[in-house]
């Protein structure tokens, strides 16, 4: 097989590796060829480790010839958001601030992936210090959307989503503090998982907000994300058995979660819900209390905790930040302790409200992002065509995801069939039940896969 192999999922590539019809080296060469062909267009990668990836692939192939199989990720090429430490390599966090920060140890998740036989192709671009939703405030230039390069790939893990969407590896590792895995996955048409808070260790990951940070995978399918999640969380990987759609009950929250949604997204999600119902899923309306407190709780936590970590750099390297990110970090220095503590208390209250909304249901279902990928450079968006009111792009893109960072509930975005730019359907499960959420998502993925974009 040549380096133009088109195996585009972990499941397909793994089956081919075990059948002996491809090799890890061929998969790596395919990923590197895709980077060579497309990275100038989308700017997904900051650094590429071609030599290291080839050496790791050759080692994986040699192990396989000796009968060693490390599991579903053995020989699988992936990429790593450049926020995650690899020993001996600068972790840029998309910034010039950390030009000389070379970690001496690997992040825990890097060790786990290496032990599972996964092969890192390189480090992906991101919104500087993960503090944005568009991946355009980066010292290495903006990430461009894989379908329309004039648009954003989402953020902050925009490079990760764009890499997977363009075949630059079969999966990528991102981070999610307010939606930064789910947002780029949704707008790029990929699957993105934010697990339950604390299930995947963040040791060795440059923090944004320790109260809200999650690590999660981006891939093409729910099953691929499930295998990545299992390795990252150090649980036994297994094939996900999709739930019977006729035994599923989903709650679609209204009010805040339905009030401001761009028309193409609303239509796509409505059609997806109709398809799920046609497959036997019960979808009922619901509410989540306390939505007026989401931003009030989210902002003090993020900016205060960011300012705390960045304090030494703010004193000595403020000129190296991009101005928008510097402004947001400095905002944390003015956050009052009483506001921070109130936000921490509100986290628990909001978690209880989401638990209540889930009562008697298997999951919540709602859009992942209320808009399609915005043009690069756009600052505001009008979500209600009947109103002249606009929202900042950042606020709009965070609007439907950030609650579940506050509460720690697992959430996943899966693509829905569309005629235009990609749209993501967000599914939210119970805390500590991420595998159950994946089984629900797999059922929804299967139902939507059998439906063409022209059906209703």
Image (cartoon, rainbow, N blue to C red):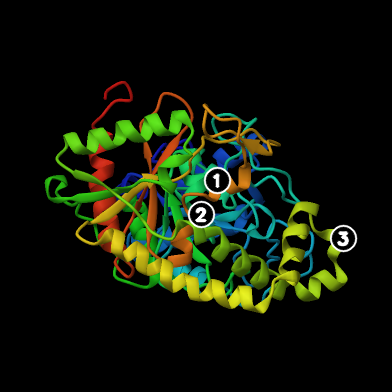
Where does the image place residue 115, in percent across and percent down from the top left?
Answer: 43, 71
Q: Nearer the viewer, residue 159 or 281?
A: 281
- Where disc 3 sits, the SS reads helix
Q: CA distance from mark 1 to mark 2?
A: 8 Å
Where does the image place residue 97, in percent across and percent down from the top left?
Answer: 79, 63
- Residue depicted at x 66% and y 52%: 127
Marked residue nearer the N-terminal end (2 or 3): 2
Where does the image place residue 113, in percent across and percent down from the top left?
Answer: 45, 66
Near mark 1 (Cα within 10 A), the count class, few <14, some 14-19 or many ≥20, is many
- Residue depicted at x 54% and y 30%: 147
Q: Which residue was labeled with disc 1? A: 397
Q: Nearer the viewer, residue 205 or 51?
A: 205
Near mark 2 (Cα within 10 A), the count class, few <14, some 14-19 or many ≥20, is many
Q: Which residue was labeled with disc 3? A: 319
Q: Are marks 2 and 3 in contact (CB under 8 Å)?
A: no
Q: Does residue 114 sit above or below 272 in this rendering?
A: below
- Where disc 2 sits, the SS reads loop
Numbered mark located on residue 179 in the image: 2
């Amino acid at each position: 097989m040549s380096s133009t192999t088109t195996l585009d999922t972990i499941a397909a590539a793994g089956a081919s590796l075990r059948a002996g019809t491809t090799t890890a080296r061929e998969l790596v060469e395919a990923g590197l060829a895709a980077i060579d062909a497309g990275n100038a267009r989308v700017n997904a990668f900051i650094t590429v480790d071609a030599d290291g990836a080839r050496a790791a692939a050759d080692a994986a192939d040699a192990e396989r010839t000796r009968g060693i199989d490390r599991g579903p990720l053995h020989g699988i090429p992936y990429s790593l958001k450049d926020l995650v430490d690899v020993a001996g390599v600068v972790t840029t966090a998309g910034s010039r601030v950390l030009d000389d920060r070379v970690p001496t140890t690997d992040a825990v998740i890097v060790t786990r992936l290496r032990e599972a036989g996964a092969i890192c192709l390189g480090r992906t671009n991101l919104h500087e210090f993960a503090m944005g939703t568009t991946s355009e405030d980066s010292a290495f230039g903006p990430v461009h959307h894989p379908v329309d390069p004039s648009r954003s790939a989402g953020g902050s893990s925009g490079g990760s989503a764009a890499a997977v969407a363009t075949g630059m590896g079969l999966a990528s590792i991102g981070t999610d503090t307010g939606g930064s895995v789910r947002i780029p996955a949704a707008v790029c048409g990929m699957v993105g998982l934010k697990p339950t808070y604390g299930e995947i260790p963040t040791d060795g990951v440059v923090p944004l907000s320790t109260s809200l940070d999650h690590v999660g995978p981006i891939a093409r399918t729910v099953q691929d994300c499930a295998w990545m999640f299992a390795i990252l969380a150090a649980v036994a990987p297994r094939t996900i058995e999709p739930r019977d759609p006729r035994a599923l009950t989903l709650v679609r929250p209204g009010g805040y979660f339905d009030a401001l949604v761009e028309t193409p997204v609303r239509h796509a999600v409505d059609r997806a819900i109709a398809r799920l119902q046609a497959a036997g899923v019960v979808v009922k309306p619901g509410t989540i209390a306390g939505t007026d407190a989401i931003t009030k709780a989210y902002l003090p936590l993020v900016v205060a905790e960011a300012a705390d970590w960045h304090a030494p750099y703010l004193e000595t390297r403020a000129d190296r930040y991009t101005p928008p990110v510097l402004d947001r970090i400095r905002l944390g220095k003015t956050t009052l302790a009483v506001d921070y503590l109130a936000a921490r208390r509100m986290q628990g209250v909001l978690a209880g409200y989401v638990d209540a909304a889930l009562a008697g249901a298997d999951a919540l279902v709602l859009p992942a992002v209320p808009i399609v990928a915005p043009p690069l450079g756009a600052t505001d968006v009008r979500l209600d065509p009947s109103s002249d009111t606009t929202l900042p792009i950042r606020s709009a893109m965070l609007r439907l995801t950030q609650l579940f960072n506050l509460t720690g509930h697992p959430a996943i975005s899966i693509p829905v069939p569309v005629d235009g730019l990609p749209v993501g359907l967000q599914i939210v499960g119970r805390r500590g039940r991420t595998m159950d959420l994946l089984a629900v998502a797999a059922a929804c993925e299967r139902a939507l896969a059998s439906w063409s974009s022209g059906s209703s």
